[in-house]
Image (spheres, rainbow, N blue to C red):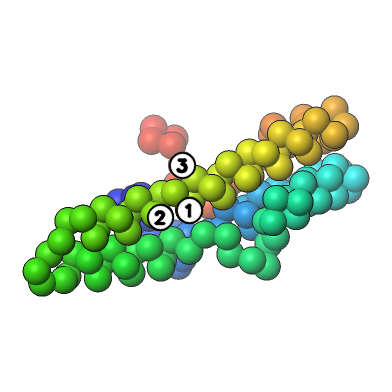
Amino acid sequence: MIAVVGAHLWFHPGPPPDPTQLVARLADGLPEADGRILRLALKSEGLTPDHRSFEPEAVLDQARAALHAEPFDPAVLAAVLHKGLSDRDAVDQAIVRAVVSSATAMSAEGRRRLAELRCHHLPPPSGS
């Protein structure tokens, strides 16, 4: 987890983007009615762009503190990282539910455009 967030910070300075905000921005690329459907589905899952649903920097800070602690306790580090993964997984699962439910209600054009959208926050795949 630290390596993934560290790689993001290397390629994209600043905090990692909040996954809820990323999906909400995808809604901006959809036909108006379909974008509303996606935003409403996110909201029904408790995911709104003004609410950071996951705080990767807080997890990194806690992991750093665990790594610097003397005596070092690997159980503390493991607990911090596992909680971070669990929190992120909960957000990811809520996003999946929102995307599936909204895609079910969207127009064919909205689903087509959703399929074509790209998340530009990620580094390009290797070899690109």
Tag 3 residue:
124
Q: Are marks 2 and 1 in contact (CB under 8 Å)?
A: yes
Please name the residue that numbered disc 2 is placed on.
84
Farthest left residue?
71
Q: How much space separates mark 1 and mark 3, taking CA atoms?
A: 26 Å
Q: Is residue 72 above or below residue 110?
A: below
Instruction: Identify the residue shown where x is 64% and y is 57%.
Output: 21
Image depth: mark 1 or mark 3 in front: 1
**Spatial CA span between label 2 and label 1:** 5 Å
Count residues near mark 3 (Cα–Cα under 10 Å), then give few for <14, some for 14-19, many for 20+: few
Query: Label 1 amino acid?
Result: Asp
Callout 2 amino acid: Gly
Q: Is residue 121 visible?
A: yes
Is residue 122 toward the left or the right of residue 98 in the image? left
Question: Mark 1 packing: few (<14 Cα in 10 Å), some, or many (20+)?
Answer: some
Q: Secondary structure at mark 3?
A: loop
Pick the front one: 14 or 96 = 96
Viewer can see residue 109: no
- Three-letter residue code for mark 3: Pro
Quadrant holding the C terminus: top left
Relative to the observer, which residue lies in front, 112 or 34? 34
Is residue 37 shown left or right of residue 72?
right
Horizontal side of 126 relative to 116 (left or right) equals left
Which image quadrant is residue 9 in?
A: bottom left
Judged from the image, the secondary structure of the residue bearing numbered disc 1 is helix
Task: Tell me the number on the disc at residue 50.
Answer: none
| Label 1 with label 3: CB-CB less than 8 Å | no
Q: Which residue is mark 1?
A: 87
